[in-house]
Amino acid sequence: MKKLMVSLAGGALSLMAAQADAADSLTLQLKWVTQAQFAGYYVAKEKGFYEDENLDVTIKPGGPDIAPEQVIAGGGADVIVDWMGGALAAREKGVGLVNIAQPFKKAGMELVCPKDGPIKTEADFKGRTLGVWFFGNEYPFYAWMNKLGLSTEGGADGVTVLKQSFDVQPLIQKQADCISVMTYNEYWQLMDAGYKPEDLTVFNYSAMGNDLLEDGLYAMEDKLKDPAFADQMVRFVRASMKGWKYAVENPDEAAEIVMDNGGQDENHQKRMMTEVAKLIDNGDGKLVQEAYDRTERALLDQKIIIKKPEGAWTSAITDKAVQ
């Protein structure tokens, strides 16, 4: 009987220890499909950086029919990757998104036009057809057109907006005079299609000072009020930025990890990782106030949001995560 009691006691202690050590489960919803744009998170999982922080992280790929803001609002994720324009628009509609970290310090969005076409400078946009993606990706484009004083309703004094597919076919098929691309993705699809850099006129949003914040990490405001959840986010951001640092320093290995998780075309992923690394900057994940102010002002000017948002971002997580 004594041995049985000792055994039971030992079993109970082991169960309690196991429960105490159980990793916190978190779900991350990506903005797009599995690709090197999100390499830092896949690397953090593969290399055990999340596990080191006592986290069990599930990474859910996105797609053309998946809106991260809706997923997290419905309880399908604890944290999402999103562009600031989409996040602030969703916040104004009642989805309490808060930016907790900003891995991408620079924007990767560009507008590209064939050099043998009619557009050489911004002054040539009037009366032309310009392609842009929607689902929140259109906000930087609309803010830029607003800055230029161009209507997006078409006509001789404005531009016609083509709701662009998530590829480069509208340019190849001459459906638009210019199309939107990302420096790390569709630009290289054009290269693969036979274009050369000298064949294109490129309007880079960051170079023009028209960039809005892309690929930030967002959590729900009400959940962040819970100290336990906030601590999970600190650990998640710390491990994620460690993943990004490793990915930037080891781009080929990072691309291979992306491939192992469902990425397509290894050469494309390696090239993408090299370009994404240029947007990460110092890898501290901290939001730059000036970049936020520029994004907010552009969205307000275009009336994408009507009221100046309060509490839309916090440095509390990165202040603890990144020393």
Image (cartoon, rainbow, N blue to C red):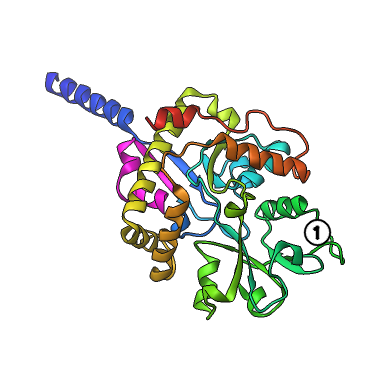
Residue 229 visible in the shown view: no
Query: Looking at the image, can residue 18 be seen?
Result: yes
In the drawing, does residue 1 fall left or right of residue 145?
left
Residue 41 magenta: yes
Residue visible at 72% across and 32% down? Answer: 308
Q: Main secondary structure of the magenta part?
A: helix
Residue 162, position as x, y percentages in the image:
74, 67
Q: Which residues are magenta?
A: 39-58
Q: Position of residue 237 (x, y in %)?
A: 43, 38
Name the residue nearer the viewer: 57 or 200: 200
- In the rendered structure, the answer to whether residue 194 lies left or right of residue 111 reads left
Instruction: Identify the secondary structure beneath mark 1.
Output: loop
**Quadrant in which the N terminus appears:** top left
Judge left or right: residue 270 versus residue 184: left
Q: Is residue 105 above or below residue 20?
A: below
Total numbered labels: 1
Residue 312 quadrant: top right
Few, some or many C-alpha atoms within 10 Å of disc 1 (few <14, some 14-19, many ≥20)?
some
Residue hosting label 1? 152
Task: Using the rendered view, name the quadrant where residue 319 is placed.
Answer: top left
Residue 323 image offset from top left, x and y in percent: 37, 29
Query: Is 303 placed left or right of 287 in the picture?
Result: right
Q: Residue 118: within the magenta?
A: no
Residue occupying the point 30% across, 31% down: 21
Q: Point out the residue furthest to the top here.
A: 2
Q: Amino acid at mark 1?
A: Thr
**What residue lies at 51% left-to-right and 45% top-to-bottom?**
105
Q: In front: 111, or 94?
A: 111
Above or below, 318 relative to 278: above
Point out residue 178 in the picture as x, y percentages from the top left corner. Answer: 68, 69
